[in-house]
Image (cartoon, rainbow, N blue to C red):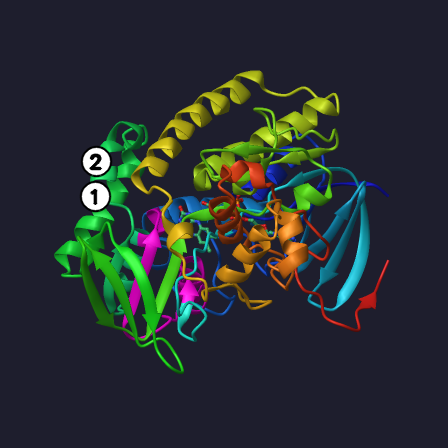
């Protein structure tokens, strides 16, 4: 039987499921995670007992609301946790349950709400043990109650930098420093946009002030030089105001904001367009979340970074669009209200991008010997060699030097590789194209059991 399927049980997917169920439609909700909530409202393992306030801070109310929505939907939706969608094609999804049972699921319509992951710009030493992405550092804390080290440095850019620093310090971990590549002046310039969401902006200010009050060093406008260490990370060096500085540490969390998880939309045949705001190719969607493929809908950070509130709204909107396409009556006033709130959120999002600008100098300054693609051990110099040999389209460069060909399928190295190719070829970043999605979108084990 063909099902209506939602991929991703984060804020976007859960609100989409709730909306469909409220209109009498019973969707299948697939998520590779064991418990619903997505990245921001990730739940701890069932036998852990930290309170919602401890786990989610100011967002505890929203997290609890989303978790209880999912719990209340029991019976009204077919929720399948621990189910990875590793391939997608016209009206068929290939899934893997609990890492061992493979199956095929046919769908009539699908909402893709696959979320985002960290955007990584490598620095020398980033492959040393003890170096994590910022999101991974937060997952360790949120999920298992662990810190990534005893003297932790958080480096890169984006609002998560301050949030994770606050969460770590609040949980009792020692933060040696926060190294923000964005200058303070950028944040001042971004004020008009940031004030579009005064409550969110106030939380950001609070985290920043709290860190200062606790004596945690925050350095802004830095250029990261390298992470030092032999067997594991033991220090970090950076430039600030023309001066070289360094600090001992045993762990580093590194990221420059987030990137959308777009592979499934790609495999489903959606058209993509360049988004200057996200500095990425994104699947195109209309204001309600309809993609270029009639039976495919897009919601949440997987189709452009907008944050958790935006994910909830776009999840609901995509479900309303789907219902409308099924010929069901939907609440037009509710839809218009959501669209209005989204427009405001978009202006805030522009403010965030201004406050935490992408470090455009990175590609020109990356040393030739810097490993960019750790799966295939491809260096910046090898990417540049492929460009010098006349290749500038990213899939050609991949074919020439294997960048993006490994286990991560370019999800970690793709953004950095694109920057290097653009810089070396002298072309605008959008001209070098995007890595084509390939199944399996995540690694699969050998010896799968196949069920129907
Ligand atoms: C590690 C991390 C931590 C974050 N923490 C915060 C935070 O603390 N505060 C904040 O404001 N924002 C945070 N964000 C930003 C966050 O992306 C959004 O605010 C919000 O979670 C987006 O909701 P979503 O529903 O679009 O996606 P997500 O919440 O990312 O949910 C997507 C879901 O899809 C599932 N999924 C993805 N691909 C597949 C697949 N192939 N098969 C099956 N399931 C799949 C995932 O398991 C996930 O549960 C974080 C982002 C990351 C990457």
Residue at 58% x, 46% y is: 72
Q: Quadrant of the N terminus?
A: top right
Q: Quadrant of residue 21?
A: top right
Identity of the residue furthest to the bottom in this view = 231
Query: Magenta includes 157?
Result: yes
Could you tell me residue 82's position as x and y percent?
Answer: 65, 60
Mark 1: few/some/many CA within 10 Å (<14, 14-19, 20+): some
Identity of the residue furthest to the front in this view = 389
Q: Is residue 211 left or right of residue 157?
A: left
Q: Which residue is mark 2?
A: 188
Query: Magenta includes 295?
Result: no
Could you tell me residue 418's position as x and y percent?
Answer: 53, 48
Q: Secondary structure at mark 2?
A: helix
Q: Are marks 2 and 1 in contact (CB under 8 Å)?
A: yes
Could you tell me residue 296's position as x and y percent?
Answer: 71, 35
Q: Quadrant of the C terminus?
A: bottom right
Q: Which residue is mark 1?
A: 184
Residue at 71% x, 52% y is: 438
The range drawn in magenta is: 132-161
Could you tell me residue 53's position as x and y percent?
Answer: 34, 55
Q: Secondary structure at mark 1?
A: helix
Residue 95 visible to the viewer: yes
Determine whether 448 is above or below 158 in the image: below
Q: Is residue 23 left or right of residue 94?
A: left
Determine whether 145 is above or below 385 in the image: below
């Amino acid at each position: 039987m063909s099902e209506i399927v939602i991929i991703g049980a984060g804020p976007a997917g859960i609100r989409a499921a709730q909306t469909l169920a409220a209109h009498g439609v019973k969707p299948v909700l697939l998520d590779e995670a064991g418990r619903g909530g997505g990245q921001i409202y990730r739940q701890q393992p069932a036998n852990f007992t930290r309170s919602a306030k401890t786990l989610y801070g100011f967002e505890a109310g929203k997290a609890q609301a989303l978790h209880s929505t999912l719990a209340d939907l029991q019976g009204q939706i077919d929720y399948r946790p621990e189910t990875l969608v590793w391939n997608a094609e016209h009206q068929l999804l290939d899934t893997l349950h609990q890492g061992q049972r493979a199956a095929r699921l046919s769908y009539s319509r699908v909402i893709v709400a696959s979320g985002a992951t960290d955007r990584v710009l490598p620095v020398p030493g980033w492959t040393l043990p003890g170096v994590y992405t910022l999101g991974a550092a937060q997952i360790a804390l949120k999920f298992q109650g662990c810190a990534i080290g005893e003297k932790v440095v958080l480096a890169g850019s984006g609002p998560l930098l301050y949030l994770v620093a606050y969460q770590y310090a609040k949980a009792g971990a020692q933060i040696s420093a926060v190294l923000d590549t964005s200058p303070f002046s950028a944040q001042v310039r971004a004020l008009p946009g940031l004030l579009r969401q005064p409550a969110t902006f106030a939380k950001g200010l609070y985290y920043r002030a709290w860190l200062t009050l606790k004596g945690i060093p925050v350095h802004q406008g830095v250029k990261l030089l390298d992470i030092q260490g032999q067997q594991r990370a033991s220090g970090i060096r950076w430039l600030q105001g023309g001066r070289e500085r360094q600090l001992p540490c045993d762990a580093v969390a590194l990221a420059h904001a987030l990137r959308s998880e777009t592979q499934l939309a790609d495999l489903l045949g959606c058209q993509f367009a360049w988004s200057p705001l996200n500095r990425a190719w994104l699947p195109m969607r209309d204001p309600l979340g309809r993609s270029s493929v009639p039976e495919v809908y897009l919601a949440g950070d997987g189709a452009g970074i907008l944050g958790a509130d935006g994910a909830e709204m776009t999840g609901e909107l995509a479900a309303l669009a789907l219902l409308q396409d099924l010929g069901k009556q939907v609440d037009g006033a509710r839809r218009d209200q959501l669209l209005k709130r989204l427009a405001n959120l978009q202006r805030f999002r522009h403010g965030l991008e201004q406050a935490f600008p992408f470090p455009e100098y990175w590609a020109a300054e990356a040393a030739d010997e810097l490993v960019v693609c750790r799966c295939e051990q491809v260096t910046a110099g090898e990417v540049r060699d492929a460009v010098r040999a006349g290749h500038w389209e990213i899939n050609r460069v991949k074919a020439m030097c294997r960048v993006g060909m490994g286990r991560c399928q370019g999800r970690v190295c793709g953004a950095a590789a694109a920057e290097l190719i653009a810089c070396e070829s002298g072309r605008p970043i959008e001209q070098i194209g995007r890595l084509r999605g390939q199944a399996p979108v995540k690694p699969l084990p050998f010896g799968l059991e196949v069920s129907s």
